[in-house]
Image (tube, grey):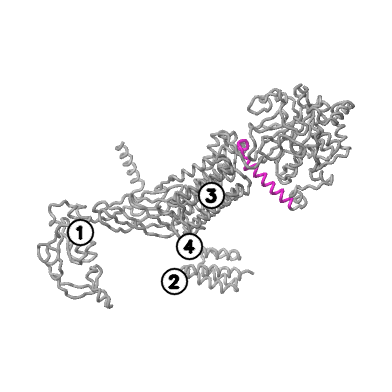
């Protein structure tokens, strides 16, 4: 039984893969749109059948006509529900990473070429749906949250694009593979000593007091500088954004190192490193990262953090 | 309680007005409490929507439901059956408005509304109510579209327009279904117990009852002839016969010796001996016609003698009239061929003769004595009957709608004392006099006459055409019709009731009909309305299995179920395909920008003014040419051109909406100024 279900599921996915191959941009057309009555649609048809039986039994032609009108309306709803999806263009746009076990988000752009597409619901499997409408010629962008299960690049599965507009009697949908991935950083794991080297002393004790770094002066703010180092007092006085400069002895750089976490499995190591990246970033300190498959030059600020996390997320994936 | 589902603001007006209008026909028809309760419940719902009231709790709703069920039970004595069921349905529908906690409930409300709308057809089937129901359906579909569009800030009219479009597209398909879906016979028998009573003739007649009917203006049936319409003096529509007299009241009765099975012959039943005899003896086919009868609640059908119909549920009774298997609970249409009365070869059977001469003993002795004496003085039964008619004609008898009350011996009292009566008095006395002389006689009840509608060339027979007359069995002739009323008031037959009564200085208060007749414009209007109603009854209400077969055999040749299904699939399918292609094609065509549409409108105006700018000319040259031709409009044209360029090239400061409005105003100005 189980194997049968798996076979069917494999066949289905294989067919879907051939029918709607992955692509960064998809135009929904009759090859890609499925349509089927909703539960209300069946209920509606049941009512039409009841009225038909009533019309036959009471020999009432108007009752029959009413029932035929409902059925015709249902048939027209097939066309309209289909049309509401047809011609919609979906484009994979940017991505907002998250930690493994939490959520990330993917941006999907929705474009309408000719006519309005109203009340379209989009979601990845297992994620809450978002509703959007686009008017003719309009383009909208939608951030859809994605459940991130493990570290690394995540393929969220096929995006379900669904609509019941206008009557809710039918559901037209498509399962689109936008070839879109979401990055999952390792889940931060606290505890243990800072796996660092190259600080003031090689013991790797974290710098509780910042006396070791001597204040050198100010330079004007450069995008990417840590906000913690901004001299807010001078900013408040109207002197613009400036970043505090500390003297930074070469050996004062903190290298977060993979090799300093022996005896743990790789994912725990990534988790620990991630935790310390966040910690050090929060303190506004400079840090570098040494992983088996790469190295990040020391630095600080959001950009450094971004790079470090990305490296941690992708490490070990390619090789 | 979970968060209450909010019906979108743009859908709510359609939902609430649709609900009210869907219940309206029922509120006008059914009990008074329904028309109080439904608006109150809807008002409550409005207050909830506005946030003034909270949703009522389970207990309140339960009590309300019980109350409504109780009220229905109190009004109808039952919760079952169409009448009570519909009342309960409408009440529960309004109550369901207070129970919308989820989107699902909103769906249920709308689908219930469809049901409520459809049930209105159980009670009235005119063209106007059909249009009304169609309009309310537009509202309900708009509401359905609205609840499927949960965003805010959408115009309700957008739903309305789409609803109109979708229903408009559905109508051709519906017509195809209507024409082609095979009409089945009822699956099981259902009895509609309507509040409307039975109308028209009843199964017995006492003096004064037909004259009461004659004050009604309601339509009884319409008749459409193939070929000529018979003259008024032949328009005797037989419905039923009264064979039993108790001294006051004539009643319908079957001779006790006759087997009930043998009394009525249906097309698919056995043919009794008398029927075979009738088939052999009947004369030529005289008239072919189609009768569309209004609901009567009775099973009697009206036709000229001797009627034959080929419908399966229509039977011919032994007294030469048509009956339907079940009571007419809706408009009913049947075709009849009337044959001339057969000339009797055999006499009446003994038991039949006895039945048709029976009189209560001791009733109206003076009339009975006169009958015996006159019959003895006459050479034949026919001569005796004619003497009676002459006597009625020559003596001072009055034809009146308000006859005085009669004593115990009704016939004596009428013939020798009051002498003022309506057709039932004359028919009753005449039949009595025949029977008292030993001549078999019965009363025939039905309608006489009918007004010709020149538009459709059909007859309208109304309740005031109700009439009774007499049939007597004459040796070697068989049943012969006598109309004693015609002897007293010949105008009744030739000209109708009103003129006949006017001849006796009687005022009729058939009301509207008299007003209508006096005004030629109103007469024409009433003919038009009647014509439409008749067409509706024939083509819509009366489109039954038989008509369907006739209609389809014109197109399909031989009609078989397979052919019908194939045709249905082919026609319906191609209609759907055409619509799909049209919709997709329309979708593919890129929409024009608003300023392109504006330019086209300007070009149309130019063309209307006789200017034919070649298509390749840039707008500036077109405008220049127009300005040259219409110097008065030059300034407006110039302004228009500036605005148009601003719209096309869109300088950052330009407000498109403002530009668009300005362009329209300027174009209208150009139109005015360029008018010569």
Is residue A177 in sight in this rendering?
no
| Residue at position x 27%, y 57% in the image | A98
Q: Earlier in the sequence, mark 2 or mark 4?
A: 4
* Residue B78 in picture, x, y percent from top left: 56, 40
Label 4 in the same subunit as label 1: no
The tag on residue B651 is 2
Q: Earlier in the sequence, mark 3 or mark 4?
A: 3
Q: Secondary structure at mark 4?
A: loop
Q: In front: mark 3 or mark 4?
A: 3
For mark 3, name the chain.
B
Q: Quadrant of residue B333?
A: top right
Label 1 in the same subunit as label 2: no
- B222 relative to B672 in the view: left or right: right
Span shown in magenta = B522-548
Q: Residue furthest left?
A: A202
* Residue B265 in picture, x, y percent from top left: 67, 27
Q: CA distance from mark 2 to mark 4?
A: 17 Å
* Residue A109 in picture, x, y percent from top left: 37, 58
**Which residue is denoted by mark 1 in the rendering?**
A275
Q: Is residue B465 above or below residue A310?
A: above
Q: Residue furthest right?
A: B377
Q: Secondary structure at mark 2?
A: loop
Contact check, label 1 and label 2, Cβ < 8 Å = no
Label 3 in the same subunit as label 1: no
Q: CA distance from mark 1 to mark 2?
A: 53 Å
- A56 relative to B507 in the view: left or right: left
- A301 relative to B280 in the view: left or right: left
**Which residue is denoted by mark 4 in the rendering?**
B593
Q: In front: mark 1 or mark 2?
A: 1
């Amino acid at each position: 039984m189980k194997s049968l279900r798996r076979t069917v599921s494999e066949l289905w996915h294989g067919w879907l893969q051939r029918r709607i191959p992955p692509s960064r941009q998809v135009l929904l057309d009759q090859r890609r749109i499925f349509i089927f009555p909703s539960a209300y649609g069946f209920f509606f048809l049941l009512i039409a059948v009841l009225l038909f039986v009533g019309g036959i039994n009471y020999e009432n032609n108007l009752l029959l006509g009413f029932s035929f009108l409902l059925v015709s309306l249902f048939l027209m709803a097939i066309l309209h529900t289909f049309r509401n999806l047809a011609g919609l263009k979906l484009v994979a746009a940017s991505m907002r990473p998250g930690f493994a076990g939490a959520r990330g988000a993917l941006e999907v752009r929705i474009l309408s070429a000719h006519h309005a597409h109203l009340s379209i619901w989009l979601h990845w499997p297992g994620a809450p749906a978002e509703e959007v409408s686009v008017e003719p010629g309009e383009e909208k962008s939608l951030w859809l949250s994605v459940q991130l299960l493990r570290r690394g690049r995540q393929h969220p599965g096929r995006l379900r694009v669904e609509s019941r507009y206008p009557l809710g009697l039918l559901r037209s949908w498509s399962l689109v593979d936008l070839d879109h991935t979401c990055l999952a950083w390792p889940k931060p794991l606290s505890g243990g000593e800072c796996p660092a080297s190259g600080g003031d002393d090689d013991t790797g004790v974290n710098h509780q007091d910042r006396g070791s770094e001597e204040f050198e002066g100010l330079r004007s703010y450069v995008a990417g500088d840590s906000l913690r180092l901004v001299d807010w007092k001078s900013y408040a006085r109207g002197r613009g954004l400036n970043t505090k400069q500390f003297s930074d002895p070469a050996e004062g750089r903190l290298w977060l190192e993979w090799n300093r976490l022996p005896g743990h499995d790789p994912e725990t190591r990534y988790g620990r490193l991630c935790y310390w990246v966040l910690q050090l970033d929060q303190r506004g300190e400079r840090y570098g990262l040494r992983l088996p498959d790469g190295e990040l030059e020391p630095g600080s600020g959001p950009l450094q953090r971004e790079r470090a996390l990305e490296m941690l997320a992708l490490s070990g994936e390619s090789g | 309680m979970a968060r209450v589902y909010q019906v979108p603001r743009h859908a709510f007006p359609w939902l609430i007005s649709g609900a009210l209008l869907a219940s309206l026909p029922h509120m006008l028809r059914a009990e008074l409490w329904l028309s109080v309760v439904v608006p109150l419940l809807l008002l409550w719902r409005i207050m909830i929507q506005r946030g003034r009231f909270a949703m009522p709790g389970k207990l309140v709703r339960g009590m309300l439901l019980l109350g409504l069920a109780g009220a229905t039970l109190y009004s109808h004595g039952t919760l079952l059956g169409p009448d009570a069921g519909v009342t309960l349905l409408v009440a529960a529908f309004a109550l369901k408005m207070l129970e919308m906690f989820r989107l699902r409930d909103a769906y249920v409300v709308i689908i219930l509304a469809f049901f409520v709308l459809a049930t209105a057809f159980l009670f009235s089937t005119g063209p106007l109510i059909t249009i009304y129901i169609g309009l309310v359906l537009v509202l309900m579909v708009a509401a359905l579209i609205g609840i499927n569009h949960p965003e805010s800030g959408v115009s309700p009219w957008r739903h309305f327009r789409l609803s109109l479009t979708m229903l408009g597209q559905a109508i051709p398909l519906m017509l195809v279904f209507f024409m082609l879906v095979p009409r089945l016979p009822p699956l099981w028998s259902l009895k509609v117990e309507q509040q409307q009573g039975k109308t028209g003739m009843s199964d017995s007649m006492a003096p004064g009852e037909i004259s009461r009917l004659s004050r009604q203006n309601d339509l009884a049936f319409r008749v459409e002839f193939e070929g000529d319409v018979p003259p008024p003096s032949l328009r005797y529509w037989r419905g039923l016969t009264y064979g039993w007299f108790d001294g006051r009241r004539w009643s319908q009765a079957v001779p006790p010796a006759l087997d009930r099975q043998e009394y009525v012959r249906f097309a698919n039943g056995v043919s009794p001996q008398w029927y075979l005899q009738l088939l052999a003896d009947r004369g030529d086919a005289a008239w072919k016609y189609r009768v569309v009868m209004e609901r009567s609640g009775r099973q009697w059908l009206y036709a000229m003698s001797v009627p034959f119909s080929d419908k399966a549920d229509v039977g011919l009774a032994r007294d030469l009239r048509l009956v339907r298997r079940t009571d007419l609970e809706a408009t009913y249409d049947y075709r009849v061929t009337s044959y001339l009365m057969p000339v009797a070869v055999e006499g009446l059977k003994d038991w039949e003769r006895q039945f048709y001469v029976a009189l209560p003993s001791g009733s109206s002795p003076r009339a009975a004595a006169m009958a015996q004496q006159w019959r003895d003085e006459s050479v034949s039964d026919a001569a005796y009957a004619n003497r009676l008619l002459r006597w009625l004609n020559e003596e001072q008898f009055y034809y009146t709608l308000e006859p005085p009350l009669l004593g115990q011996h009704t016939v004596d009292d009428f013939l020798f004392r009051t002498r003022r009566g309506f057709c039932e008095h004359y028919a009753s006395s005449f039949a009595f006099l025949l029977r008292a002389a030993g001549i078999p006689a019965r009363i025939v009840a039905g309608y006489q006459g009918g007004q010709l509608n020149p538009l459709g060339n059909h007859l309208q027979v109304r309740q005031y055409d109700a009439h009774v007359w007499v049939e007597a069995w004459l040796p070697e002739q068989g049943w012969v019709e006598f109309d004693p009323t015609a002897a007293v008031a010949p105008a009744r037959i030739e000209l109708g009731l009103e003129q006949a009564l006017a001849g006796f200085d009687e005022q009729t208060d058939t009301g509207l009909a008299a007003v209508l007749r006096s005004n030629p414009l109103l007469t024409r209007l009433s003919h038009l309305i009647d014509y439409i109603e008749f067409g509706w009854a024939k083509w819509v209400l009366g489109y039954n299995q038989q008509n369907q077969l006739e209609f389809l055999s014109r197109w399909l040749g031989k009609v078989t179920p397979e052919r019908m299904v194939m045709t249905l699939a082919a026609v319906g399918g191609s209609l759907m395909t055409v619509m799909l292609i049209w919709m997709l094609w329309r979708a593919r065509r890129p929409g024009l920008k608003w300023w392109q549409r504006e330019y086209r409108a300007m070009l149309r105006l130019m063309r209307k003014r006789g200017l034919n700018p070649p298509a390749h000319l840039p707008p500036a040259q077109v405008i220049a040419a127009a300005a040259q031709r219409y110097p008065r409009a030059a300034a407006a044209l110039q302004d228009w051109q500036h605005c148009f360029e601003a719209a096309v090239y869109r300088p950052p400061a330009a407000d498109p909406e403002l530009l668009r409005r300005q362009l329209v105003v300027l174009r209208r100005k150009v139109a005015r100024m360029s008018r010569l």
